[in-house]
Amino acid sequence: MTNSKPASARRSDALSKARIVQAATEMLDEGGTDALTFRTLAARLSTGPGALYHHVSNKEDLLAAATEAVMASVFESSPDNGATEPGVRGVMMRAFDAITTRPWVATQLAGAPWQPAVMHLFDRIGTELDARGVPEHAQFDAASVLMYHALGAASQRHAGRQLAATVTDRATFLDSTRSAVTDTGDYPFLTRIASQFAGHDDREQFQAGVDIILAGIDHP
């Protein structure tokens, strides 16, 4: 009887786009965009870089997919998200938390504003505004303003990451900016609110912006 070599067992964790995106998201959370390459991702998944191209075209495609996965998950009102506030306010605050806790998400949203993750956020905001009873003719403008608020936060967070290369302490930077404003005398309003500027909380400020926008939507 001829001895035959046993056939290799098929991997139970077959490679898929969802598995690739999950691994990429973990790497992005751990080390940011610089840590993610097809070679390092392939090593993490115990496969070859070529196998990844069957599912994602390039790094930009992978970043867009990872950002979409993150944004889709934060829209879910579940205990895993921590913040489970319903409605458009809840969606906006969960989006802000994703932007601030995952800097690479802020960079991605700021750099590619019409990617699927942004469209998903726009659609979800509009859906919540509809449920809130906002008239259909006003929903596009209302959703757009809220989108600009979220993308503005993403842009500011991205800019802050660039600044971090030269300034490592946020409090020191804000205090020095406050001093520069008050010393010149050229900015009367900023001088009046200088103490608030130096000690403000970004999340509270973003939330205040959402509330102002919603107040205007509810009472045009």
Image (spheres, rainbow, N blue to C red):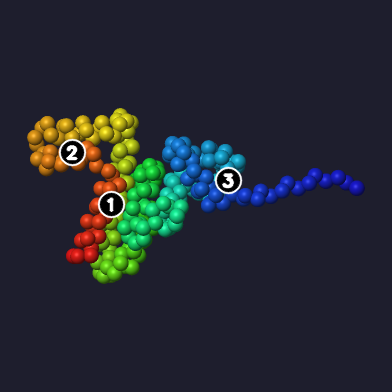
The numbered disc on residue 195 is: 2
Q: Marks 2 and 1: CB-CB under 8 Å?
A: no
Along the polypeptide, which appears first: circle 3 or circle 2? Answer: 3
Dot 3 lies on which element?
helix
Residue 173 position within the rendered picture, expressed as x and y whole percent measured from the top left: 25, 32
* Pointer 3 residue: 51
The residues bearing labels 3 and 2 have C-alpha atoms spaced at a distance of 55 Å
Q: Amino acid at mark 2?
A: Ser
Residue 209 position within the rendered picture, expressed as x and y whole percent measured from the top left: 24, 52
The residues bearing labels 1 and 3 have C-alpha atoms spaced at a distance of 43 Å
Residue 146 located left or right of residue 182:
right
Residue 5 located left or right of residue 24:
right
Count of numbered badges drawn on the protein: 3
At a point 86% along the width and 45% down the height, the residue shown is 3
At a point 59% along the width and 49% down the height, the residue shown is 15
* Pointer 1 residue: 207
Q: Can you name the residue that lies furthest to the right here? A: 1
Dot 2 lies on which element?
helix
| Up/down of 16 relative to 186, above or below | below
Residue 92 position within the rendered picture, expressed as x and y whole percent measured from the top left: 33, 55
Label 3: few (<14), some (14–19) or many (≥20) C-alpha neighbours in 10 Å: few
The numbered disc on residue 220 is: none
Give the image quarter of residue 178. Answer: top left
Q: Amino acid at mark 1?
A: Gln
Along the polypeptide, which appears first: circle 1 or circle 3? Answer: 3
Residue 62 position within the rendered picture, expressed as x and y whole percent measured from the top left: 47, 47
Q: Amino acid at mark 3?
A: Ala
Dot 1 lies on which element?
helix
